[in-house]
Amino acid sequence: MSAVIRNNRRTLAKVLIMRSRTPRTLKRTMLGVSALVSMAVGLPSPCGATVAPHTLVSQVTCATPYVPMYHVDGLSQLRRWSNSSPATGGGSWTQQQIGTGWGTLTVFSGGSGTLFAVDSQGNLRWYQDGGFGGTGGAAWGSGTGSIVGTGWGGFTTLPSGGQGVVYGIDASGNLRWYRYLGTNGSASWASGSGAVIGSGWSGLKLIASGAGTLYAVNSSGALYWYRHLDPTGGSASWANNGSGQQVGTGWTFTATGSMGGGVLLGRDSAGGLWWYRHTDPLGGAATWANSGIAISQGVGWAPVAVLADVAGCVAS
């Protein structure tokens, strides 16, 4: 194992986005609230009828003019999809091919154009997309592709919380914390990287949304909110005494991701991509934007991983 990570015991042949001029919407149910469900069977629902679903508990600010999402297509090409309005779900998407030969990598976004990738040998590689805020072609930073750690092949999930923070669920169900401090691909990590900050996380799909906010989806499709209170320092300090707050049901997506600030994306089994915004990512109340209506981002996304840039939006 590398000394850097000493604490770790460790298609899409062609994407066709068929968008209407007006995004189609989908009614969902709220727990304890009657709603139209004729088209919503099996799709996610926010929890909580005690607070109006349209209540904005937190404000969200997103980068302009675009926030990116990345995917590796069936030809092993890396593509950047740029969204013009992630805060509302109503923006357009523009895509560019920015790399080739990515098919053997497990890729996740580190925010602000940073990408991490685990190769077949378990090496962790660092990349920087210098054009992440626009719609142009490849503009890779110095040091792109550098190995910044080893022994990363044993994690079941690896989301990043932005600011160099990486969370990983290991084979024993421990939640581990890391923070990358390097520049230009140097292998520099915060003291304590690899620390266990939680246990019992086996079988969960983990989504990081910035500022220590984590969402976990269990095998039943229930969506739970957690907040790590020391995301940059790595101590095992949690809001709500570490207990998860259930904020949704039916989250049986084949892929999920976050653009930060509670902006969530989910891809269904038919290749549809859906937008949601949890309006209290900092406090955990079960409140959702757009009155609990999901907004379609188009179809034809299968089998795209949702590698959204977690630093694109910030809640306050």
Image (spheres, grey):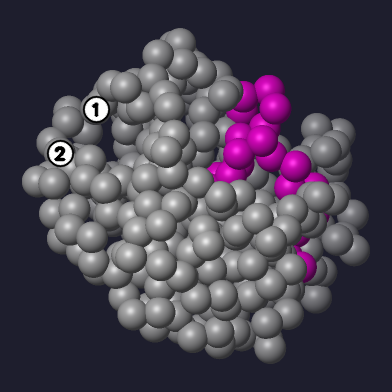
Label at residue 254: none
Circle 1: is it few (<14), some (14-19), or many (20+) Cα within 10 Å? some
Which of the 4 image quadrants contains residue 97? top left
**In the image, is residue 254 part of the stretch drawn in magenta?**
yes
How far is the residue under mark 1 from the one under mark 2? 9 Å
Q: Look at label 1 and name its amino acid.
A: Ile
Answer whether labels 1 and 2 touch (C-beta < 8 Å): yes
Left or right placement of residue 152 versus residue 287 in this view: left
Give yes or no for residue 15 being in the magenta stretch.
Answer: no
**Looking at the image, residue 109 lies above or below residue 136:** below
Q: Tell me which corner region of the image, top left, top right, bottom left or bottom right, holds residue 33.
A: bottom right
Rate crowding at label 2 as few (under 14), some (14 to 19) or many (20 or more) other CA atoms within 10 Å: some
Residue 37: x %, y % from top left:
85, 40
Q: Earlier in the sequence, mark 1 or mark 2?
A: 1
Q: Residue at x 40, y 79 (%)?
A: 192
Residue 15 appears left or right of 47: left
Residue type at numbered disc 2: Trp
- The secondary element bearing badge 2 is classed as loop
Q: Nearer the viewer, residue 251 or 43?
A: 251
- The image quadrant where one finds the N terminus is bottom left
**On screen, 264 above or below 177?**
above
**135 sits left or right of 234 in the view:** left
Eyeballing the image, is 197 above or below 157?
Answer: below
Q: Quadrant of residue 187?
A: bottom left
Q: According to the image, label 1 marks what residue?
A: 98
Q: Residue at x 45, y 11 (%)?
A: 13
- Determine which of the numbered discs, if any, sits on residue 140 in the image: 2
The magenta span reads 246-272
